[in-house]
Image (spheres, grey):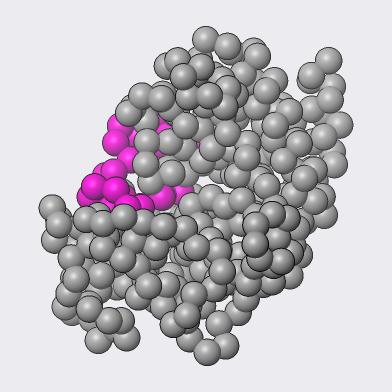
Amino acid sequence: MKSSKSKPNLTISNPDKIFWPEEGYTKADLATFYTEVFPWLQPYVRDRILTLERCPDGMRGQCFYQKEMPKGMPAGTPTKRIATKSGSRASTNYVVGGSLETQIALVNLGCIPIHVTGSRAKTFPKPDWICFDLDPMSESFQDAASASVYVKKVLDELHLLSFAKTSGSRGLHIFVPIAAGPTADEVLKFAEKLVSMVAKTYPKELTVEHSIAARGDRVYLDPFRNGSVQTVVAPYSVRRKPHAPVSTPLEWAEVRSLKDPATFNMKSFAKRLKKKDPWADFFRRKQSLRTALSGLDRLAR
């Protein structure tokens, strides 16, 4: 992306603070990236409940997660209060995304990645997507890419159109747009059942083992991003990783040919935005989970 020096002054504190020492990227560079990418990012954060990952010193320091809306957010920032099942709080007042002002305010608080729920605030807890997180034990993205073939095969058999994106790390996310209606618990049960079936079919390559030690060198199929207040990194989110990689929507044809997902990063991403958006019709392709549930039951027999 272009240097923040060519942009108008952003309303953030310590804009020259270095967030990525090796690359020299600053807090202002991050704010500029999100400003420029926001037209593509906005559909995935609009009315979404956010969990904040705050890294006030960028790559140098420690990060911490925060669910309660922090002090310092702009007046009128949208929020969603949700009852808490455990802990000392009776409820949590989450930040709700959707505006550039909110996004830049989060950058100002040291938030690098954007973590979103599958449900929108207005329809909570009824998601409008299913997420499968494919996490390889190796550092090779190609392991996740290979595993995605098996998951996509079952989704295709269920006549569910799916979309792939890099996680921004070594893994891959598969999203399935659905019509809001089933609860997050129902979506999670569907995802759990599907990945268990796929892992049983390909036990040498895939696993649903919670224990890292028990996974061996297999790719972990994680369905748990589908819990009601569980989150996943949004498309077009920057990650707190070397080279500032971006979680990037892909064409399915790109998945197998991509060697290093870090080639999509904060510096190079302007080139990516000149290409056709592979997820352009994502929210126009909402599908019935009820129909897929019946199909999954048949496949599992």
Given the current orientation, which residue lies at the most extreme top position? 204
Left or right side of 250 for 80: right
Q: Which residues are magenta?
A: 239-263
Q: Which quadrant of the rendered structure holds the C terminus?
A: top right
User: Is residue 46 something that shows in the picture?
Assistant: no
Which residue appears at 66% of the width and 45% of the height? 226
Left or right side of 291 for 11: left
User: Is residue 45 something that shows in the picture?
Assistant: yes
Image location (x, y in percent) of residue 90? 71, 66
Judging depth in this view, the residue of 64 and 248 nearest the camera is 64
Image location (x, y in percent) of residue 33? 31, 67
Please say if 76 is above or below 175: below
Image location (x, y in percent) of residue 122? 73, 70
Image location (x, y in percent) of residue 118? 64, 54
Judging depth in this view, the residue of 74 and 235 nearest the camera is 74
Which residue appears at 39% of the width and 76% of the height? 104
Please say if 285 is above or below 258: below
Given the current orientation, which residue lies at the most extreme front position? 88
Q: Which quadrant of the rendered structure holds the N terminus?
A: bottom left
Left or right side of 222 for 197: right
Judging depth in this view, the residue of 172 and 208 nearest the camera is 208
Please say if 300 is above or below 175: above
Which residue appears at 35% of the width and 75% of the height? 108
Please say if 177 is above or below 8: above
Which residue appears at 57% of the width and 88% of the height? 76
Left or right side of 235 for 7: left
Indicate the quadrant where residue 56 lies. bottom left
Confirm whether the magenta stretch covers residue 119.
no
Confirm whether the magenta stretch covers residue 255.
yes
